Image (spheres, helix red, strand yellow):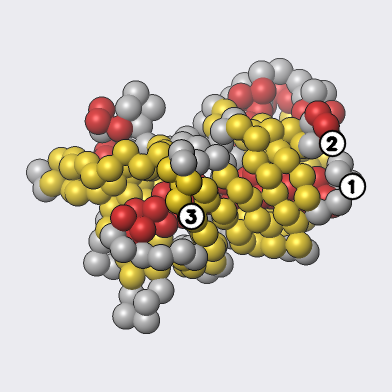
Amino acid sequence: MTQRTPIVKMSGAGNDFIVLDEAVWETLPGDRATWVRGACRRGLSVGADGVLVVGPGGDGGVRVVFFNPDGGEAFCGNGTRCAARYAVWRRLVTGPRMTLATAAGPVPAVVEGGIVSLRLPPPEDRGAIELKGPDGDVHSGRLVIAGVPHLVLHVPQVAAWPLDRLAPILRRDPALGPEGANVDIVARDGDGRVHVRTFERGVEGETLACGSGAIACALARAAAGAVSPLRIETAGGDALVVRWQAADDGFEVWLAGPAEVAFTGNWEFETAASPRI
């Protein structure tokens, strides 16, 4: 027996997502977390950094639920930007401006062609933190909550730093909380460009971009003297732009970058195989 599911694949500066209409999501058979895990597996399925479920919200807005590849719900900055572009494309809203209901609260968005800008809830800078790595070295960083927690580490060069070896251990350090944190490494090159790589919890691997990670890195750079706006060069080759200004509750932050449709189609999969994947 096979199940045909209409899907859209989108990319937000390198983060790739499977996007489903809320009505389609409600028709999926079996356990939804199992479906997400199966759909996101690269090499064996569609493959993605997560699943977005998008539908109409109250007062003309948009509701978006994001699932990590492990099936757990979370907030995703680039996913929210893709959801806004999807809402305009599918005419869930009447214009380029909208407010999206997310796991991090209401997020205003503006869609201008393939570029989507968000105004995010104020992030929380928890300050400097030191963690001991598996090699016994002490890694000095900054803990920033930008919808989800991020450990930001300034390194000499992002390409040479062993993210795949150290991040899976550092991200689970008890000092980062019971759920751990994403790990972002950031460096400034000789031309003044800021480069970032991110290891995401829930994905349990490096992604080509991370919107909330870009915000966390921008605020960590701000603590080191950087000024707004800041262009973030991602591992996927695209750039994200973060703007911020002081506010009564800390910072007001905006995130902008590309959000593009990669393809649309009908995914046919064997429902009998879903418990196995």
- In the picture of the structure, the residue carrying the numbered disc 1 is 94
Q: Which three-letter amino acid code belongs to the residue tagged 2?
A: Gly
Q: Where's residue 130, x and y in %?
A: 18, 42
- In the picture of the structure, the residue carrying the numbered disc 3 is 245
- Specify the quadrant that holds the C terminus: top right
**Vertical arrangement, residue 133 with respect to residue 218, above or below:** above
How many angstroms separate mark 1 from mark 2 (CA)?
A: 8 Å
Q: Where's residue 261, x and y in %?
A: 75, 57
Q: Where's residue 260, x and y in %?
A: 71, 59
Quarter assignment of residue 134: top left
* Whether label 1 touches label 2, CB < 8 Å: yes
Tell me the mark number nearer the camera, choosing from 3 and 2. Answer: 3
Q: Is residue 168 visible?
A: no
Tell me the mark number nearer the camera, choosing from 3 and 1. Answer: 3
- In the picture of the structure, the residue carrying the numbered disc 2 is 60
What element does badge 1 sit on? loop
What element does badge 3 sit on? strand
**Vertical arrangement, residue 190 with respect to residue 214, above or below:** below
Task: Name the residue at 74% across, 33% down.
Answer: 63
Q: Which three-letter amino acid code belongs to the residue tagged 3?
A: Gln
How many angstroms separate mark 3 from mark 2 (CA)?
A: 28 Å
Q: Where's residue 164, x and y in %?
A: 33, 50
Q: Is residue 99 left or right of residue 48?
A: right
